[in-house]
Amino acid sequence: MFLALRDLRFARGRFTLMGAVVALIAVLGVLLSGLASGLADAGISGLRALPVTHLAFDEKATSEQFSRSTVEEKDWRAWSEAPGVERAEPFGNTLANAQVTQGSRKGEQVNLAVFGMAPGCLAPAPSEGEGLKEGGSGIVITREIADLGVRIGDVLTADKSEVPLKVVGLVDETVSYGHIGVAYTDLDTWRHLHYGLPGDLPEAAGRQATAVALTLEPGADIAAVEKATGTRADTREATFDASPGYAAESSTMALIKGFLYAISALVVGAFFTVWTVQRKAEIALLKALGAPTGYILRDALAQVVAVLVGATALGTAVGLALGSAMIGKAPFSLSAPAIATSSGLLIVLGTVGAVVAVRRITAVDPLTALGATR
């Protein structure tokens, strides 16, 4: 009875070796999942934090929208008056380099992902300091920038535009865009940084933004306003690919994880193929004694699942320990859904690979157990 499960105790060495291989694959799966989540957070957490459902870009900007799109004041006014639109606000996005000119880290170079917006609309409430004010040239920084040594009260001067940026608030979250910490500011300050112009802006530039940040009602029909304004509304999630490097990173990590899962299925399948062949005589004896094929298959699959679940649980625990040590030292984030998916896929695909091997049981001739030679 329960031959396959009793084999786990009889052949401890072989199953321990197989379990170690599965556990190492599980460790790698956890680390890859954490790295993929960390890279995604570093690339798009700033966009993900925006309290919007859609972003409307210039319809001519079909890719890299944040660097190619420009919308006018008439566009966001038209969107704000359209039916089904709860809110429409101008949103600016640009990357800038600045230097700390006043503060303890004077002379420090700081990269900024600058999000321009009307005060009190899209920016999160600061954990420390004050929020944005119109025309104040102030910025609210996020934790990633603060970790570089920038503090509230420091003044940063942007290259080209030479605009002084006073740090007035801190959002105590790691929010970034394109692997660069986000700094929130008002639209006028953003326009100076975006166009790199000191002094007064040209009149036309003072009425422009990158996109229109939208909050739409479910099922809102926006085709008419899109056509009238020459813009295209994309869901917030659809804009993630426009973040620098995000699409390439995501596809690369998905490809690596896909190969890992395929390898795990092949490794488990190969092991149980050899193990089934070695147990051919015992299986034939069970069938000769009257054991149904279905019972033997269930017994064998129980062995497979026991090995996979135990080894995957051990490997996942080790992976979580290693991943916890990596947080803060690499773009790594432990996401429970991602890790659960990784572990579940390892068990499922390993079981699928083993099923191919276990199916050989149905071809075992019970006469083999009686010493038949032909």
Image (cartoon, rainbow, N blue to C red):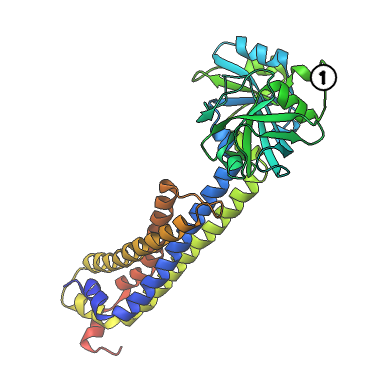
Residue 237 visible to the viewer: no
Query: Which quarter of the rendered picture does the N terminus lie within?
Result: bottom left
- The front one of 201 and 169 is 169
**Residue 13 placement (x, y as % from top left):** 32, 80
Position of 50 relative to 222 (above/below)? below
The residue carrying mark 1 is 200
**Residue 285 placement (x, y as % from top left):** 21, 80
Give the residue displayed 40% in from the left and 67% down from the top: 23
* Side (left or right) of 302 relative to 356: left
- The front one of 222 and 29 is 29
Position of 304 relative to 103 (above/below)? below
Residue 255 visible to the viewer: yes
**Residue 294 placement (x, y as % from top left):** 24, 64
Label 1 packing within 10 angstroms: few (<14), some (14-19), many (20+): few
* Side (left or right) of 160 relative to 227: right
Quarter of the image where one finds residue 239: top right
**Residue 22 placement (x, y as % from top left):** 40, 67
- The front one of 288 and 169 is 169
Give the residue displayed 53% in from the left and 27% down from the top: 124
